[in-house]
Image (tube, rainbow, N blue to C red):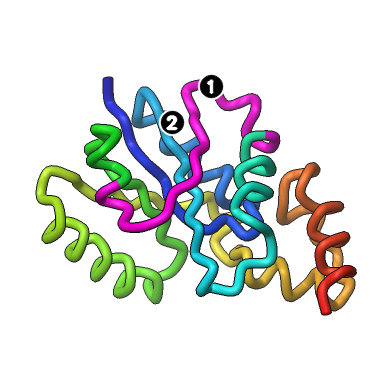
Amino acid sequence: MKRAVFAGTFDPVTNGHLDLMQRALRMFDRLTVAVAQRAEKGVLFSQEERVAMIREAAASLERLDVEPFSGLLVDFARERKIPVIVRGLRFVSDFEYEFQMALMNRRLSDEIETVFLMPSETYTYLNASLVKEIARYGGAIDGFVPPNVAPRLREKIAKAP
C-alpha cells in the first residue's frame, strides 16, 4: 500500500488544500492529513477545530485520515511507517523554502521522500493567510474555503480582539 502524509497548519483549510488532497489520492492508496499544532504561528483556530473542519470538508474523500501532530513531521511519518511527504508548490517562490525543508527532512530521515504537487490553476494564488485577511475586512470568502469553513471563519474573526 502506497501511503503519504500531507502536513500543514490548515488555518483554515482552503479549497486549494482540498485540491491537493484529491491530487495526492490519485497517486497514493492512503493519505494522512497531519494538522500541526504550531501555536508559534499565531493560528486563529485551535488544532482540534482545524482537525474537525478538515474531517467535515473532506468527508467524501475515501482513503483519507486526519490526525493532529506536534513535533517533527519526519518523526510523525516514521512512527506511522509513512514513506512519502506531499507538499504543494504554488509559485516558484515556494520552491526555495520547500526544497530546503525536503532536504532537511531527508537528512533527518533518509527513508522518507518528499513529493511536490502543483495545485489546479484555480488555486495557485490561494493561501490561508490571504483568506483570513479577506475575512477580516468583510470580503467574500465562500469560493476560497469549503462551505463548512466560511461561517466558522467569519464567526472567529468577529470574536477576535
- Residue 131 rendering spot, x and y as whole percentages: 70, 66
Q: Are marks 2 and 1 in contact (CB under 8 Å)?
A: yes
Marks 2/1: CA–CA distance: 9 Å
Pointer 2 residue? 25
Q: Give the position of the C terminus as an image quadrant.
A: bottom right
Q: Please state which amino acid type lies under the numbered disc 2.
A: Leu
Residue 69 belongs to the span the image colors magenta: yes
Q: Residue at x 62, y 64 (%)?
A: 128
Q: Which residues are magenta?
A: 56-75
Task: Write the residue at 17% across / 63% down.
Answer: 103
Residue for point 63% across, 47% down: 48
Name the residue carrying label 1: 62
Q: Secondary structure at mark 2?
A: helix
> Which residue is more in the foreground, 147 or 92?
147
Query: Is the residue 73 above or below the residue 59 in the image?
Result: below
State left or right for residue 79 relative to residue 130: left
Find out whether residue 139 is within the magenta segment: no
Q: Is residue 52 left or right of residue 28?
A: right
Sequence-wise first label, 2 or 1:
2
Question: Residue 58 appears at what percent x and percent y?
Answer: 62, 34
- Left or right, 15 with respect to 149, comes to left
Neighbor class of circle 2 (other Cα within 10 Å; few <14, some 14-19, many 20+) is some
The amino acid beneath tag 1 is Glu
Task: Give 64 or 160, whichever is nearer the viewer.
Answer: 160
Query: In the picture shown, does residue 135 fall above or below 110?
Result: below
Residue that appears at 31% across and 30% down? 3
Mark 1: give few (<14), some (14-19) or many (20+) Cα within 10 Å.
Answer: few
Q: Position of residue 1 (x, y in %)?
A: 27, 20
* Residue 95 sits above or below residue 59 on the image: below
The label on residue 146 is none
